């Protein structure tokens, strides 16, 4: 290699690095796609198991709007499938063929929910 070809090679390499850097920067500048999260008043709630308790631990619902709570049978085991909202007289045992608890909250307020033995618990907030 003579000096000229070394110089040309160097220029090409620098140009490539520059292009690469610009491509990476412009990629970072691209706004990330917005995460689709359920609104707080969602009428469909997926009830799973988090860290030592139900997830979510707070379920938001609207008075007069039908609410569906779907039990995550992959995560809910044993008595945690036995779900109840005592104050509202709602009980449900989630099974493979019956994963949905459907009811319409009729009154506003905060009502505790739990498994039948009270080990897992949370709050249903009706507004
Ligand atoms: Cu339990």
Image (cartoon, rainbow, N blue to C red):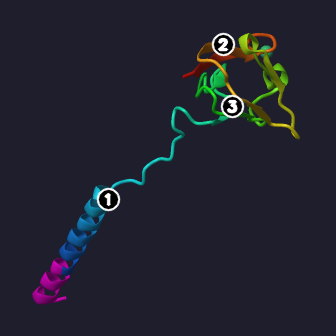
Q: In which quadrant of this rendering is ligand 1 seen? A: top right
In which quarter of the view is residue 119 placed?
top right
Q: Secondary structure at mark 1?
A: loop
Q: Secondary structure at mark 2?
A: strand
Query: What is the spatial separation of the Cα atoms under label 3 and label 2, in whole angstroms?
Result: 16 Å
Query: Does mark 2 have its CB less than 8 Å from ligand 1?
Result: no
Q: In the picture provided, is 21 more to the left or to the right than 40?
A: left
Percent coordinates x, y for residue 81 in the rendering: 81, 25
Label 1 close to label 3 by CB (< 8 Å):
no
Relative height, residue 102 to residue 57 (above, below)? below
Which residue is label 3 attached to? 48
Between 85 and 20, which is closer to the camera in this rendering? 85
- Give the prevailing secondary structure in the magenta stretch: helix
Q: Which label sits in the foreground, 3 or 2?
A: 2
**Numbered label attached to residue 30:** 1
Relative height, residue 65 to residue 16 (above, below)? above
**Numbered label attached to residue 112:** 2
Q: Which residues are magenta?
A: 1-11
| Magenta stretch contains residue 2 | yes
In which quarter of the view is residue 113 placed?
top right
Query: What is the spatial separation of the Cα atoms under label 1 and label 3, in whole angstroms?
Result: 33 Å
Q: Residue at x 77, y 37 (%)?
A: 74
Q: In the picture provided, is 63 more to the left or to the right than 115?
A: left
Dot 3: within a 10 Å radius of its alpha carbon, few (fewer than 14), some, or many (20 or more) residues? some
């Amino acid at each position: 290699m003579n000096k000229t070809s070394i110089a040309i090679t160097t220029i090409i390499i620098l140009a490539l690095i520059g292009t690469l850097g610009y491509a990476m920067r412009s990629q970072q500048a691209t706004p990330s796609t917005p995460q689709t999260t359920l609104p707080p008043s969602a009428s469909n709630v997926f009830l799973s198991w988090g860290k030592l308790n139900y997830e979510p631990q707070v379920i938001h619902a609207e008075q007069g709007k039908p609410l569906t709570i779907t039990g995550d049978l992959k995560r809910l085991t044993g008595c945690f499938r036995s779900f109840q909202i005592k104050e509202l007289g709602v009980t449900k045992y989630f099974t493979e063929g019956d994963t949905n608890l459907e009811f319409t909250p009729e009154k506003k307020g905060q009502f505790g929910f739990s498994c039948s033995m009270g080990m897992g618990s949370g709050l249903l907030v009706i507004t």
